Image: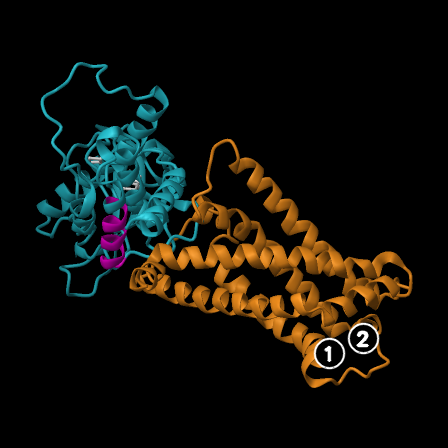
Amino acid sequence: MSWLTKSLGSSLGKKLLMSLTGLFLISFLLVHCTLNALVFLQDGGETFNKAAEFMATNPVIRTMEIVLFLGLIVHMVDGLRLHFENKSKRPVAYAVINGKNSTWYSRSMGLLGTLLLLFLVMHLSHFWFNARIAGTIPEQMTMFEKMKEVFVSPIPVIVYVIGCGSLAYHLMHGFQSAFQTIGWNHPKYMPTIKCIGNIYAIVVSLVFAAMPIAFHLNLIK
Amino acid sequence: MEGNLNLTLKIWRQKNANEAGKFETYQVSGISEDMSFLEMIDVLNNRLIEEGDDPVAFDHDCREGICGMCSMYINGSPHGPNKGVTTCQLHMRSFSNGETITIEPWRAGAFPVIKDLVVNRSSFDRIIAAGGFVSVNTGNAQDANNIPIPKEDADEAFAAAACIGCGACVAACKNASAMLFTSAKVSQLALLPQGQVERAKRAQAMVAQMDEEGFGACTNTGACEAECPKGISIENIARMNREYFSAVFAAK
Ligand code: SF4
Ligand code: FES
């Protein structure tokens, strides 16, 4: 097994971990986003609550929840480690930097990821922690009602929208970058991958951002 | 070669590897726009020598874009503002009269400054020495068509082999990563039949050496590809990753 730890500890190994956990988190976000979009059905959250109930009780989903947290932790720890290691590789900084050779967000993945992490702390404490761990969401209160309650105040709405903005840019680079790292850069497919990545990043972030805004403005019945 | 460009130069001066450096400001006047950037520095150096000062040390050899020596980070870009050229191929017509030009050495822990604008790039040599060769017996030169190689493969190998080891990719990268260089050297051999025998070993050895030298890990920003004077594509990095991962997971 030492070959595995040695290879995963190399620069390429650490990148591979970022890429695989990133793709896994991308697949999770798609499910999360689709299920949450059910609140827009204007049925008083009936369908959404059923889906939330299923996600909260199904043993397969609950097991995947653990895998998800593991994936998230690996992505975070490995990402921060890469960030600080990479920073140390240029001990003397340049006086002038012309940023035109790459996009600002591709160079700011550490910052965007940290913003996402801060958002995530708030997000998890609103919903996941209260529902699954602390049990502070009363029995008779549904997830739909909880969402309504959280987004009455403008502060979480603003934090969520900033979180979604960070997510959009993080994904615009992260999606195609994950494929490049695992070696899937092919002249025939790469333009499609980049295009899908951008669409995915923008659509998922917009749908997520629409929820707190719509709840806050009382647009969801 | 008299011209009419008057310029302010902010140049990084550093006595040796151990002493701290700083920027010095110089004025040059009457620079012709037909001069190359290095010739402009020559003009400054001639004057400094006449005045009894220490001339600005910089690397150069071929002055035609082949040797990869002329490492200068000009106004925030390796080899200056133009695409697909080295500093020796950059002409003063790319600058305007009265402009201030900031000139820095490549900045990377793995490229320590020796003096002024000269950096030590022997870390690249050690990456090559770790696996950028074939040691199988290839025998005498064969008939041209004895080893059939598809045109596409030959073209791609040749495009990768165009890398001159200048280090602009490292200089441009926010992580000071050498993956564009290393991947070009892995690719030029991985694409050809002669390179097959040591393929798995090569990818692992060169990546290990690259890490050992203290280059960073690529985050796929693409800055290297945009700044490379030889247009080396980051598709080579994807290929190196494939080579490395298949070597790691498939090798016995
Ligand atoms: S890949 Fe391009 S920038 Fe990097 S060393 Fe080779 S020629 Fe220079
Ligand atoms: S001096 Fe040889 S490439 Fe510039």
Locate ligand 2 by image quadrant: top left
Q: Colour of chain B?
A: cyan
Q: Secondary structure at mark 1?
A: helix
| Residue visible at 36% across and 60% down in the picture | A8
Residue located 65% across and 70% down the image: A62
**Kind of residue indicated by mark 2:** Lys
Residue B248 in the image, given as x and y percentages of width and height: 32, 52
Residue type at mark 1? Ala
The color scheme shown is: by chain
- The residue lying toward the viewer, choosing from B16 and B233, is B233
State the predominant SS element of the stretch in magenta: helix
Disc 2: which residue: A146
Q: From where the camera sits, is residue B218 visible?
A: yes
Per the model, the C-alpha gap separating discs 1 and 2 is: 10 Å
Q: What residue is disc 1 on?
A: A131
Circle 2 SS class: helix
Are there few (<14), some (14-19), or many (20+) residues within 10 Å of tag 1? some
Neighbours of disc 2 within 10 Å: few (<14), some (14-19), many (20+): some
Mark toward the start of the polypeptide (1 vs 2):
1
- Percent position (x, y) of residue A84? 39, 67
How far across and down, in percent of the image, does residue A100 sit?
A: 46, 45
Q: Is residue A27 above or below residue A196?
A: below
Q: Is residue A94 visible?
A: no
Is residue B209 inside the magenta stretch? yes
Between disc 1 and disc 2, the foreground one is 1
Q: Chain of mark 1?
A: A
Region in magenta: B202-214
